[in-house]
Image: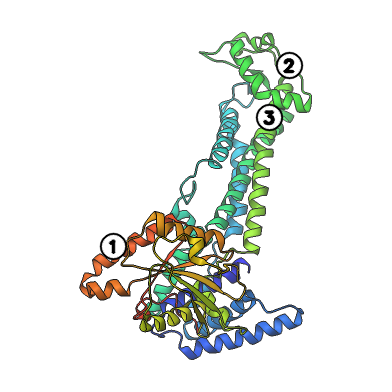
Amino acid sequence: MNEQVARDVVLVRAIETMDRKREILSDDDRMYASRSAKELAEWQASDSKAAVTADHFLQQRAEQILKRLVERTPALRAFLHRRVGWRTLSIGVPLIALLVGAGVDRISDPHRVDLLSAPLLAIIGWNLLVYLLLIAGLFVPGPKTGWAGAGLIRRLSTGASALPRKLPSTLTAALVDFSAEWTRLSGGLTHARLARTMHLAAALFAVGAVLSLLARGLLTQYVPGWESTFLDAAQVHAMLSVLFSPAVWLFHLPGFSVADIDALRFATSPSAAGGKRWVLLYAATMVLLVVAPRLLLAAAAHWRARRLAASFPLDLEQPYFRQLRGKMGGEAGVLRVLPYSFTLDETRDKGLAAVAAMLLGEQARVMLRPPCAYGDEPRDALGESRLDDPAVSLTAVLFNLAATPEKENHGTFIEHLTRAAPRGVAVLVDESSLVERLGAGARNRIDERIALWQQFCRHHGAAAVIVNLLDPQARPLDQGAA
């Protein structure tokens, strides 16, 4: 799905998930949206002679729900039509950079071309430093928000932080939750667009400086030269030889000697002859070291942004989307559960069926495997179970929160499953035994144990999903779809 469809789908998920009491959308509203979306998706697929996809279904369902919400709450329309203004930003910033670059070299004497021009050398030096930082960033991980601040990324992802007034409190909370989630999900796209704009602005800044230098040369006789308190002619020659070598080699421009440099000291009243050579050397160097690389980087960022906007990376394997896919029809989902050193009684077995419904929809079935003994090798514990079984919608390993996670046992088991299962593995951690043993008054101790398991699972490449098999509704898993 594209960016706009993904945005609508994520917004609807935030609203449905936050609206647990059905204050905004009733069960009838949700079921009607699902039925209508299924019919519209089938018609759309029939017209294009293709199969019904989850993308089409989710798109139609989100449109149905948002349309109904706007009819009931007109103030929501302003939020839905809020735009960040990427087009203005993408055109305005590079244009301003072009104009500023055109005036940057007018700080000095407009009738001379300084071989050691501070503005021109600063432009080249800054861009070379940026290239080094970009290369280093490929090997050294930086902050999640990159060089841009978190506030700027949030503003560019979701627009102004102020929300429309006169909204129900539940809807306001849903919009806040959506803004945070969308900022996280669209971070890669926002970074690509921002990088495209900044690379293009840097290129046009250099273009402005070069055009200004060339344009003034049409009506002004440049006097080339240099002056320095600390550098002599040999040192200046060595520095300029390195700086101008790409332009000299590629464009076959005339070189220069130490004597040529020494003769151009402003203190020795240099001649106006030869100004053209130095202007062309600077112009060619700026094109090679600044304009061309920046345009290539801008093109790469533009391609990345277009690709992400056309095919937005939204994880449809989350419980909310799995439930909705069940509304599309087809076979009921199958949740295969692998208990690890954990034997389920009849009550918890029924609770597991409720968890399966939360994960895969109301018609989901549970395939409960025999418990894996503590310390068993993963391959031996699984036996002949195929982790790539097409009849299984989702494989889940079930742990007991009362157990202390161990790297050699629990960690090894998780890592083996995540490597071997092509469609991923869910890690379920049941809190019911620990809550039953400690009582509701020990909530802090239970929360500490939950945090321990979550950190442990993240370390082993999985996300822990906390469930309560004695009271599944105490731990709803992204419920809201109907």
Q: Position of residue 212 (x, y in %)?
A: 67, 35
Residues tagged 1 and 3 counted as in contact (Cβ below 8 A): no
Quadrant placement of the N terminus: bottom right
Q: Residues within 10 Å of mark 1 (few under 14, many from 20)?
A: few
Q: Which residue is mark 2?
A: 273
> Image check: 284 left or right of 128?
right
Please give the residue where the numbered disc 1 appears in the rendered image.
448
Residue found at x 47% / y 57%: 461
Residue 250 occupies quadrant: top right
Q: Position of residue 38 (x, y in %)?
A: 62, 85
Task: Please tell me in which quadrant of the rendered image residue 276 appears.
Answer: top right
Residue 171: % across, % down = 42, 77
- Closer to the chain start, of discs 2 and 3, is 2
Q: CA distance from mark 1 to mark 2?
A: 79 Å
Q: Is residue 46 above or below residue 418?
A: below
Measured in 3D between alpha carbons, the distance from the residue under mark 1 to the one under mark 3, in whole angstroms, is 60 Å
**Amino acid type, residue under disc 2 in the picture:** Ala
The kind of secondary structure element at disc 1 is helix
Vertical placement of residue 160 versus 136, above or below: below
Q: Which residue is tagged 3?
A: 285
Are the residues tagged 2 and 3 within 8 Å (C-beta)? no
For mark 2, does the 10 Å Cα neighbourhood hold few (<14), some (14 to 19), or many (20 or more) residues?
Answer: few
Amino acid type assigned to the residue bearing label 1 in the image: Glu
Query: SS for tag 2?
Result: loop
> Mark 3: which amino acid?
Thr
Mark 1 vs mark 2: in front: 1
For this view, does 237 lie left or right of residue 183? right
N-terminal-most mark, 1 or 3: 3
Q: Nearest the camera: 451 or 396?
A: 396
